[in-house]
Amino acid sequence: MGTATGSAFTAEALRRGIEGNTGNSLLSLYADDAEIRIVDRDTQPSHPRVLRGRPQIAQLLDDVYSRDMTHKLDRCVVQGDHAAYSESCEYGDGVRVLTESMLTLRDGKIAEQVMIQAWDE
């Protein structure tokens, strides 16, 4: 399968994508057929939320980046075809969110992501 055109994955490209004002730069790091599994309080490990393909990922990113919140890449480790990172976010009202992600890379793009997220209640 072909991959999306655009940026290749690096820790710095990930930082620019996460800390940007829109999800467009971040979306460019995903392969066309990428899959994200999201685990949190509402979508637990036995029934994660699964997004398949760039169109579904774009919908998530459009929603997230339309909110009054900041995003910060705290740490990123890249080793071969795998990467892991921590992201912290804060809503305008002070509610905080923390995510941890494990990535599988293919041809310089994110092919698979498992994201675990928690937020203040």
Image: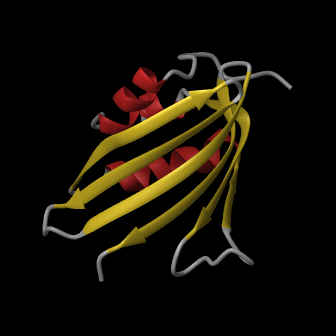
The location of residue 20, given as percent across then percent down, is 30, 34
Q: Is residue 32 above or below residue 87?
A: above
The location of residue 48, given as percent across then percent down, is 68, 70
Q: Quadrant of the N terminus?
A: top right
State left or right for residue 11 relative to residue 2. left
Image point 53% across, 44% down: which residue? 58
The location of residue 110, given as percent across then percent down, is 65, 33
Image point 40% across, 39% down: which residue? 75
The color scheme shown is secondary structure
**Residue 105 can be seen in this image:** yes
- Asked where in the image residue 4 lies, by quadrant, the reply is top right
Q: Quadrant of the C terminus?
A: bottom left
- Asked where in the image residue 89 lies, by quadrant, the reply is bottom left
- Asked where in the image residue 81 lies, by quadrant, the reply is top right
Q: Which of 28 and 43 lies nearest the eye of the viewer?
A: 43
Q: Which of 58 and 100 lies nearest the eye of the viewer?
A: 100
Image point 22% across, 70% down: which residue? 95
